[in-house]
Amino acid sequence: MNVSSTARGLLAATAVAVFATFLARASQRQVVRLDYDDGVYWQTALAVADGYQPYSEVFFAQPPLYAWLSALPFALDAGEVAARLLTIGWAVLLAAGAGLLGCVLAGRYAGMAAALLVALLPPVQRYCFQFGADLPTAALVTWSVVCAVRARPRWWLASGTLLGAALSMKLIAVVVIPALLVSALACQRRLAALASVSAAAVAVCALVLIVTSPPEHAWDQIVGLRLIAADLQGQPVPDGVITMLALWIVPFGLLSGAGAYLCLRRLPQERRRPLVALVLWGVTGVLVAGLHRPIFEHHLLLFVAPGAAVIAAGFFALLRSKAKVVTTTALALICVVQALTLPVSSPRETSAILRCLRALPSGSVLVTDDQEIAARAGLRTPPWLVDTSRVRISSGHLTTAEIIAGASGAVGVLFAPPDRAKFVDPAIKAWAPQRFPVSYTADGYLLVVSTPLNCAP
C-alpha cells in the first residue's frame, strides 16, 4: 500500500472516529447533566419556530443568527434529533477546521491528529451535541482563520464573511480579530487583505442588523445585560471552571506551548507565518479566561482549534512517516473508545419528575428555571421566560414580578433542584403554592400545578 492510499484510508478513519464520538455523546444526553444554556437555547428555538420574535417577545442575549438557524429544524417539524444533528455538524466543522490548520503547519498527518485532538477535548465532547451559540461561533472563526492563512483575495473575502457570520452568532468572536490582522499583515498585499476581510465582515453584520428588530431592545439584551453583569460584584469563578483548569486547560496550555516551541525549531520558514496567528489566538484565549466574568467552560471552545493544531504540528514534526501513521491511528481509536467509556458529565436521574411533566398536556406552557427538562417533556416556557439565568436576574433584566406575570397562562411552576435553582427569591416560592395548590416532589424538583396528575410509573 503506497503512502497516498494509506493517507486516504487514515483520513476516512479519522472522519469516522470524529463523527462516531460525537454521535456516542449525543446518545448519552438523557442520562447526563447538561449545561443550563442547553435548555435556554432549546426553548428559544421552539419559541422562534412558533413565530415569536427575538428581543421583542423572546428574550435573547445573543445576536440573532443562532436563534434563527436553531429554530429551523423545529419550524420544519424535524424535531430534536435533527436539531442535535445540526449541532454535531458544527462540532465536525470545528474539528475539520483545526485539521486544516494542522495540515497547513505540518502536513496531512498533523492535520488528522489536530482534528482528533479537538474531538478528544472534554469541552468539545461535552458540548458537541448541546444547543448553544459557542460551538458554531468557534467553528466559524476557525474557518475564518483557515481562509485567512490561504493568503489569496477570494479567500480573504471568505474569511471576512465567516467572521461576520460568527459575530452575528456571538460577540465573543471579536477575539479572533488580532489573529486575522497578523495573517493579513503577513501578506504581500496587506492593504487589499485588510480591506477585503473588513468589508465582507461589515457587510454581513450590517445585513443582520438591518433585519434585527427592534434594535434598541436587541442592544439592551445583547450588550446592556453584559455591561451590567460585568460590573456586578461577586462574580466568582464557578467550581466547574476550577476543575476544568486542573483537568485539561493547564495541561492543554502547556502542551500548546511545547508544540509552538517545536514548530519554531522544526518547521520551515514559510510554515511559521500561520503559527504566529495561531499562537496569538491562543494567548487571547488565556486573557479571556482570566478577565471575562462570569467565565464558563463553553466560552473556551473558541480556543481549542489553535491549540490542537499547534500541538499536532509541533509533535508530529518529531516523528517519522510510519510513526505518524501509528500515532494517528491510535488517536482515532482512543477518540471512539473514550466516548463510549469515559463520562464528561455527571449522571442525572430525572425519570420521576419527567413522568409528572408528561402527564401535563403536550405543548402546555410551564414556568420553570430548568428549561431543558420542560422541553424534554414536550412543554413550552413563556417566550419571555426562556432565559431565567442568574446573570439575567442579577442584572435586573428579569424581575420577580415578570416571573409571576409569566405564569398567568401557565399550567404550573417547576422549581429546579437547589444546585440548579435560579428562582431563589422567597416571594416566588411563597406565591407559587397559592396560585397552584397541588405539589409534587421528585428528583430534587418541586412541581406545583392546579389539579392532581397521574405520576405513577
Image (cartoon, grey):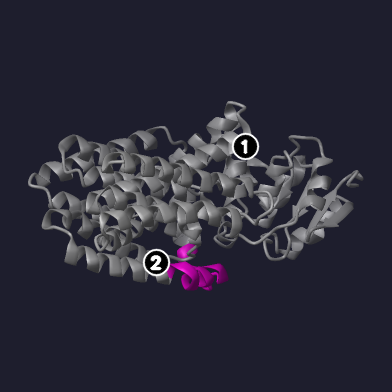
Q: Which corner quadrant of the image does residue 84 belong to?
A: top right
Magenta residues, start to end: 229-249
Q: Residue at x 16, y 42 (%)?
A: 195
Q: Is residue 287 magenta?
A: no
The residue labelled by disc 1 is 80
Q: Position of residue 158 (x, y in %)?
A: 26, 37
Q: Position of residue 33 (x, y in %)?
A: 65, 57
Q: Earlier in the sequence, mark 2 or mark 1?
A: 1
Q: Are marks 2 and 1 in contact (CB under 8 Å)?
A: no
Specify the amino acid type for callout 2.
Phe
Q: Is residue 163 above or below residue 280?
A: above
Image position of 266 (left or right of 375): left
Q: Residue at x 89, y 52 (%)?
A: 437
Q: Is residue 203 above or below residue 18?
A: above
Q: Residue at x 25, y 55 (%)?
A: 179
The residue labelled by disc 2 is 252
Q: Which corner quadrant of the image does residue 74 belong to?
A: top right
Image position of 317 (left or right of 439): left
Q: Secondary structure at mark 1?
A: helix
Q: Position of residue 445 (x, y in %)?
A: 78, 57
Q: Which of the image's four quarters has the N terminus? A: top left
Separation (CA) of disc 2 from disc 1: 33 Å
Q: Is residue 244 magenta?
A: yes
Give the number of callouts. 2
Badge 2 crowding class, 10 Å Cα cut-off, few under 14, some 14 to 19, many 20 or more, is some
Specify the amino acid type for callout 1.
Glu
Q: Is residue 86 above or below residue 444?
A: above
Magenta stretch, overall SS: helix
